[in-house]
Amino acid sequence: MSPERSIFSITGDVTLTELHALVAVADLGTFRGAALELGYTQSALSHQVANLERKLGHELFSRPGGRGAVKLTVAGHAAYRRARRAIGEADAIRAEIEAAERGSRTRVRIGVSQTTASEIMPAALREFRELHAGVEVVLSAIDTDEQVISELSRGGLELGFVHDLTPDDRVEMTAITEDPWVVLTRRDSEVAALSRLSFDDLDGLEVVAWTRRWRGQIALEEAWARRGIAPRIVYRTDDNLALQRLVAAGLGHACVGWLSARRAIDPALTWLVPTEHVAPRPVVLCHARRRELTATLAALAAAIRDQAPRPER
């Protein structure tokens, strides 16, 4: 990687295997995690990345050593963007061949919640459509994790979102982001005026909540009970828009997921991040274990993982 080298050239053919290695390491931040994700030994994965760096004539990662996460260099960022595009193009070729062999328009059915449909899928579908414009994607609102998994296992869905990482033999699971609890409130409320918010501050306050048919709401209320606090639940609803309207009307505060709170529908609303984390809320993408992912599904799953918003830590 000579500093006087001013003319860029590629020495040798770059392979998709090497590009997959680059993307996996960049996405996961470690060679070990990338090797596990791709099913390689760590030394084999490191060899692929080293080969790619040699061919491109630039270091693609800064390696701090120890447990520090590896990070893309300036050249690495440029290569990463092109690598994702190249992998997408290869997936698109396979998908179009599959569609041609079937002789019909490809349809993908995805089980979604209100939040995943509105906060994750639009950006993912925009990326996906650039290379797969002929694929029809159907977003089906499914009430519970169990219903999603059941539909996946019987073939009623190709992909689906759940909010629990408990293993299930019927599906393969991939955590794509987190949707931690935040407190939604009016900007002029006493809660909004707090410099630091704890869930303990909700003790005795009026709260608008989800109905208890949602596993996440049950887990939240159990976490409150363990902390010895008892917010006064005055309204319950299954509808995200209705919940936000009730809070905006000053009828109570609410604990909601970060994904929906970050784009609250009323300018009177704001949200605060509690100082403690309770009741984890992963967002998990699933497909049936006994069905191999087609190139089309793999490309859509990749777009979802790539575009999913991630909360700042």
Image (tube, helix red, strand yellow):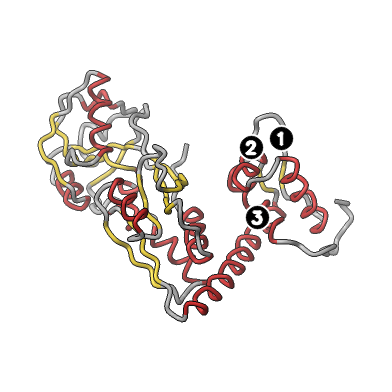
Q: Which residue is mark 1?
A: 64
Residue 203 position in % (x across, y down): 19, 24
Residue drawn at x 35%, y 35% is: 273
Query: Which quadrant of the figure has residue 15?
Result: bottom right
Q: Identify the mark nearer the N-term, 1 or 3.
A: 3
Which residue type carries mark 2?
Answer: Ala
Q: Which residue is mark 2?
A: 69
- Up the image or down, 147 lies above or below 211; here it is below
How crowded pointer 3 is (Cα within 10 Å; few <14, some 14-19, many 20+) is rated as: many
Q: What whole-number distance in Å separates the C-alpha atoms at marks 1 and 2?
A: 7 Å
Q: Nearer the viewer, residue 268 or 253?
A: 253
Residue drawn at x 79%, y 64% is: 13
Q: Is residue 286 left or right of residue 150?
A: right
Q: Are marks 1 and 2 in contact (CB under 8 Å)?
A: yes
Q: Nearer the viewer, residue 246 or 307?
A: 307
| Residue 20 numbered tag | 3
Give the structural element (helix, strand or loop) at label 3. helix
Q: Nearer the viewer, residue 61 or 37?
A: 37
Give the structural element (helix, strand or loop) at label 1. loop
Q: What whole-number distance in Å separates the C-alpha atoms at marks 3 and 2?
A: 18 Å
Q: Nearer the viewer, residue 62 or 168?
A: 168
Which residue type carries mark 1?
Answer: Pro
Residue 104 position in % (x across, y down): 43, 79
Q: What whole-number distance in Å separates the C-alpha atoms at marks 1 and 3?
A: 22 Å
